[in-house]
Amino acid sequence: MTLYFTREHEWISVEGDSATVGITDYAQAQLGDIVFVEVPPAGTAVDKGKETAVVESVKAASDVYSPASGTVTEANEALEADPSLVNTAPETDGWFFKLTLSDPSQLDGLLDEAGYKDFVAGL
Amino acid sequence: MSDQTDTTEQTGDDHAPLAPLALPLDAWHRAAGARMVAFAGYEMPIQYEGIIAEHLWTRENAGLFDVSHMGQLYVSGDGAAAALESLLPGDIAGLGEGRMRYSLLLADNGGILDDLMVTRWKSGFYLVVNGATKADDIAHIHEHLPEDVTLNHMDEAALLALQGPKAVDALARLAPGVAALTFMTAGAFTLDGVPAWISRSGYTGEDGFEISIPAEDAPRIAALLADQPEVKPIGLGARDSLRLEAGLPLYGHDLDPETTPVAADLGFALSKRRREEGGFPGHERIMAEREHGAALTRVGLFVDGRQPVREGAAVVDAQGDTVGRVTSGGFSPSLQRPIAMAYVPAAMVSPGKVVSLVQRGKPLSAIVATMPFVPHRYVRQGKPKP
């Protein structure tokens, strides 16, 4: 399993051509209390860099972009009942959706954990 | 991930050309762990531990808000009451000493230039106006004052708000006598040796106080108040969610020059004598709207589902045409559901009416609610705290 990050503060965990996507701990801290998450249902085709999910905090709505293209295989239904999972466990139970990658080579330009840490430190 | 909307930051003065200024309590906020944002031309605390926690703490205990960005003005001179009555629709002449009134600065066409509080002090009137509009307000008032009436901008004063059911316990410990105040009354007190003008008022729907003190004393007094066991510092984020639950409009969002007192459902700000006598800007139009209704009226909305609806969402009719707009919206921490304020046509105004909304292309449904969403808990005359 390999973990990648985007400069837009999403993470994507990849195993073969299957991947799980969420937002980073830094992102949830910036957003504050999360009250609503809308994730695409299974079967949705998603494109790298396109708005794929919506996350709403008390004060703002934000788009979440898919770090890679593919087809959604599962949405995290737990977020509907408890959106605050994104605050308490952004990189585990607070995942957004799983997908089958259509082009794993798209991952090449993403950051690794150390690279993302440096990126955030410079913000 | 990227911000689509950030209602709180939009709340500030979008046109402020200069770098945001620091308020007297800037260092204190940072030391208390605040996240600072630009708002109304100042660096202001948006949150400390988190908006929901701060919101709920204020509803149950007491929250300390720094509202020093707001404009504190003093209007004095023999004709001060008459001069203010030429700009506002409230009964200012009849305001007793230490009494305050919510009022509206009106344009010639009856549009709302700002909303404000007016209190009669011994020798004149103390006004608190919005931070983002204070420069325009000062210019407008100046322009319309007769020569014998003076307007002072009290820019050496800080303004704190202490809000919540336990605010009275915390403040009475430091400023003896404040418990005798009732809602919308004010007086001069001594707060740990500092001269303080304190009113029993606020912007949360809770009992509470607003405290005007010299800016130089503000850091010490803020620290002293925050040290009281009932008190935590509260940021602008919770200030916004608290006022939304209380059904209180926010200038620049729910009120602007395109809205009128009747459209904004602020008829209570039109004092009876002033309605009858007139003599305030827009009297004719406002009386006509009072008789026949305004084209659009501000209402509260309970939004179906969990997704907040924000400022800018459209109110649509059965054909999908835009007929109104959402002016404030968010997630209510007390009710655990999304709530909003919107301007809607007359046919949709009554509580229980279903209202269709469109936000970023997505249809949503809401029901007109009676405001406030969360009951006010003001301490009024003859109704002492149990």
Image: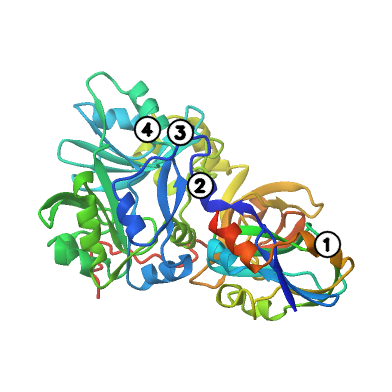
| Classed neighbour count for the residue bearing mark 3: other residues with Cα under 10 Å, few (<14), some (14–19), many (≥20) | few
The percent position of residue A121, horizontal first and vertical second, equals 54, 58
Q: Nearer the viewer, mark 3 or mark 2?
A: 3
The percent position of residue B186, horizontal first and vertical second, equals 21, 51
Quarter of the image with the C terminus of chain B in it: bottom left
Residue marked by disc 1: A106
Q: Tell me the kind of residue under disc 3.
A: Leu
Q: What's the distance in space between the residues labelled 1 and 3, CA to CA?
A: 42 Å
Q: What's the distance in space between the residues labelled 2 and 1, CA to CA?
A: 39 Å
Could you tell me which secondary element the residue under label 3 belongs to? loop
Residue B18, label in figure: 3
Residue marked by disc 4: B277
Who is closer to the viewer here, B312 or B218? B218
Residue marked by disc 2: B11
Q: Tell me the kind of residue under disc 2.
A: Thr
Q: What's the distance in space between the residues labelled 4 and 1, CA to CA?
A: 73 Å
